[in-house]
């Protein structure tokens, strides 16, 4: 399968994603400038703390961009359906195309997506079979980065020794308190929202149910054998290697060749 860039034309989605990138840029620029570098120079923190912050920040933006431009599982124009698999397919009454069961038609994107979970305006893309793993990584690293930022904001005021402030940028020197308050405010909002979302996502994977299936209460109709959690997570991430579940810099290969893609993988 070629790795094409998938780009959804939706101004509302661009605004939501722009807001997320703004928050990320704000923290990645100001937290090192106001807290990490000055405290490192004065010996209050080690270089490991600085590097860890940048690693979290890098993993966060990498999973955001990859989740946003990855094909979530759009169906090919004329899928070749093996006769033996026909019972697993159904007709979409919106785009008039055959699709595997558990697919859903996204009205924002205008096409069907395999095992669609939901359409997320914050990544301006659908979350489906092929990019669900990146969306989970995004939630995970966003929680780590916002928690780390909140801890640094807190320590800067209540725990670390006061800075001498000799070599400080004039802008940072004048607006230190405002910069930290904005960072803490954004961190709390994002951490609260993402933690709740991440929890529902994990429950969904444990029970092998998508958000759409949960909302439409159709899971009772789908007679699926209950799988162990390692299996459902491995299918989402495309590997049994748990360490790889945390790495956004790789290509995901479906664990089992899915019947609906068997002709072009
Ligand atoms: Zn459709
Ligand atoms: Zn969509």
Image (cartoon, rainbow, N blue to C red):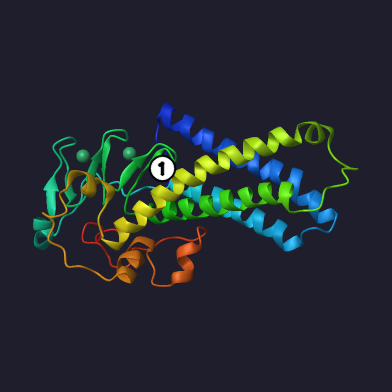
Q: Residues within 10 Å of mark 1 (few under 14, many from 20)?
A: some
The image shows residue 143, relative to residue 257, as above or below, that is: above
Front-most of 59 and 170? Answer: 170
Percent x, y of residue 196: 40, 48
Quadrant of res 119: top left
Q: Residue furthest front?
A: 158
Q: Regarding ligand 1, which quadrant of the image does it lie in?
A: top left
Quadrant of res 264: bottom left
- Residue at image mark 1: 6
Front-most of 204 and 237? Answer: 204
Q: Point out the image quarter for the C terminus.
A: bottom left
Residue 177 placement, left or right of 85: right
Q: Point out the image quarter for the N terminus.
A: bottom left
Percent x, y of residue 50: 72, 56
Percent x, y of residue 58: 60, 52
The image shows residue 210, relative to residue 250, as above or below, that is: above
* Residue at the image point whose x is 15% and y is 41% from the top: 92
Residue 5 placement, left or right of 154: left
* Residue at the image point whose x is 45% and y is 60% from the top: 251
Which type of secondary structure does the marked residue at label 1 adopt? loop
* Residue at the image point whose x is 65% and y is 54% from the top: 53
Quadrant of res 96: top left
């Amino acid at each position: 399968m070629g790795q094409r860039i998938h780009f959804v034309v939706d101004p509302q989605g661009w605004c939501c994603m722009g807001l997320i990138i703004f928050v990320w840029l704000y923290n990645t620029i100001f937290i090192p400038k106001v807290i990490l570098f000055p405290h490192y120079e004065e010996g209050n923190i080690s270089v490991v703390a600085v590097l860890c912050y940048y690693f979290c920040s890098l993993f966060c933006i990498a999973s955001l961009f990859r989740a946003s431009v990855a094909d979530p599982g759009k169906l090919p124009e004329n899928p070749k359906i093996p006769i033996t698999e026909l019972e697993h397919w159904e007709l979409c009454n919106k785009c008039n195309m055959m699709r595997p069961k558990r697919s859903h038609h996204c009205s924002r994107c205008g096409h069907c997506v395999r095992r669609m979970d939901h359409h997320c305006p914050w990544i301006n893309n659908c979350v489906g079979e092929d990019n669900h793993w990146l969306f989970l990584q995004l939630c995970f690293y966003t929680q780590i980065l916002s928690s780390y930022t909140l801890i640094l904001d807190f320590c800067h005021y209540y725990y670390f020794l006061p800075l001498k402030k000799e070599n400080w940028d004039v802008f940072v020197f004048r607006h230190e308190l405002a910069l930290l308050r904005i960072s803490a405010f954004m961190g709390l909002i994002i951490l609260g929202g993402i933690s709740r979302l991440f929890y529902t996502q994990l429950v969904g994977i444990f029970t092998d149910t998508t958000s759409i299936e949960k909302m439409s209460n159709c899971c009772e109709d789908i007679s699926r054998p209950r799988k162990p959690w390692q299996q459902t997570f491995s299918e989402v991430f495309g590997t049994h290697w748990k360490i790889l579940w945390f790495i956004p810099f790789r290509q995901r290969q479906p664990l089992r060749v899915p019947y609906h893609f068997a002709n072009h993988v």
